[in-house]
Amino acid sequence: MPYKTTIENTVFRFDDLKQLMAKATPERSGDQLAGIAADGPVERLAAQMALADLPLKTFLSEELIPSETDEVSQLIADQHDAKAFSSISSMTVGDLREWLLRPETGQRQLEAVTFGLTPEMVAAVSKIMRLQDLISVSAKREVVTRFRNTIGISGRLSTRNQPNHPTDDSRGIAASAIDGLLMGSGDAVIGVNPATDSTEDYIRIVSLLDELRERLAIPTQTCCLGHVTTAIRAIEAGAPVDLVFQSVAGSQKANAGFGVDLALLREAYDAGRSLKRGMPDANVMYFETGQGAALSADAHFGVDQQTMEVRAYAVAREFSPLLINTVVGFIGPEYLFNGKQIIRAGLEDHFCGKLLGLPMGVDVCYTNHADADQEDMDTLLTLLCAANVNFVITVPGADDIMLNYQSLSHHDAVYCRETLGRLPAPEFEQWLMSVGLTNADGALVGAPAALTGYLQHSGLIGA
């Protein structure tokens, strides 16, 4: 059905909900590339006004992608809890924004409506919110997960230690992982993006990371970010797999481009759970997403990239992940052109994931051909800490030498700890103190003997 609004005697008409959502989206290059963005700020404002007046119930009757042909749409319908929705069912999108921002709307209220909200509702309300709105609401929503430690407690910030190597060299991975540990990074996960996707290399990498974890008695989890089919084969071979990883997107066609569907993800989830390597009822999945993934695969069906991103969160929450993060600036300037767009997208993604009950992290990053720099990343990191982000990703010197993009450095995490008072996971915090990496105040004090001994044993340094 068409939607319309009037600004100074000019009537703006939007043919359907899909077009209304796209036109209401804050400016970004991906929607312009797809030819669905607003013509300018006035049309965008008109769409946002019409969207604010839209009843939330509309999203239950008008699908953006038909569930008859898309299993993600069907999953979204299946996940919706009418009882959880009842308390907000009379609201418009604008009413929902006002309710979210009320001081009396806190953790209990937000948690109660989690499965009453659909991804499209959440994407819609994010489009009419300022950055401070996104931060204020996200900061109120705590999502805690556990494997060997506890991630997501309010006021804490976990980190993924990402020791990637261009050739998956074992010594290079180990040296990089130790570099991060010396800076206090790695409580969310020590996770490697493999340069290849062979089962043999996958098993070698998870075995290496597990040996490091066990030798140093680190209360964390490890992961090789290979394809789920590789993880399943490795599990069948008896490999020490902690977390099962997969990139996911917001449509069945886009997920098929990743080589997965919901049935395969369920098989991978069951395989990970079968190992029982974490604490009882541990979360075993790790997902990555990113605005533009569906558009780059020609699998967005005319839906704006931010809404497609939030639809991916429905896939993720079906499997109760330990971790999920948006690689917000990784896909490139074709989708998020500059630092301003990356900052906005990172805060949107975090807000939307948190409202849907996900343990949301962000890879604060950009590609070298984007109109962005490390000062933009400083801004986004600081704002995310204010928004109570669960974790961020750090690499040596902020430069990922395998994936060829810019992320955060381990030193950036130290800034968050020292300046913003964001402590790591409590179990990891205690380990840092027990091995002598930090003092009683949590400040880094230098390399302890245990880490030095591991380096010597591994031949990474001389005796």
Image: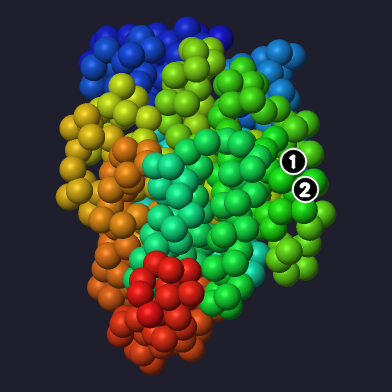
Query: Toward which corner of the image does residue 27 lie, by quadrant?
Result: top left
385 in relation to 269, above or below: below
Quadrant of image for the N terminus: top right
Q: Nearer the viewer, residue 208 or 314?
A: 208
77 in relation to 389, above or below: above
Q: Which residue is mark 1?
A: 233
Q: Is residue 35 left or right of residue 42?
A: right
Residue 77, percent across and down? 72, 29
Q: Which residue is mark 2?
A: 237
Q: Amino acid at mark 1?
A: Arg
Residue 347, percent across and down? 37, 46
Spatial separation of the CA atoms under disc 1 and disc 2: 6 Å
Quick check: can you spot residue 41?
A: yes
Q: How is the image coloured?
A: rainbow
Residue 339, percent across and down? 22, 38
Q: Residue at x 63, y 29 (%)?
A: 57
C-beta proximity under 8 Å, tags 1 and 2: yes
**Mark on residue 151?**
none
Could you tell me which secondary element the residue under label 1 belongs to? helix
75 in relation to 145, above or below: above
Circle 1 Cα neighbour tier, 10 Å, few/some/many (<14 / 14–19 / ≥20)? some
Q: Residue at x 45, y 14 (%)?
A: 19
Q: Nearer the viewer, residue 19 or 451?
A: 451
Q: Amino acid at mark 2?
A: Ala
Quadrant of image for the C terminus: bottom left
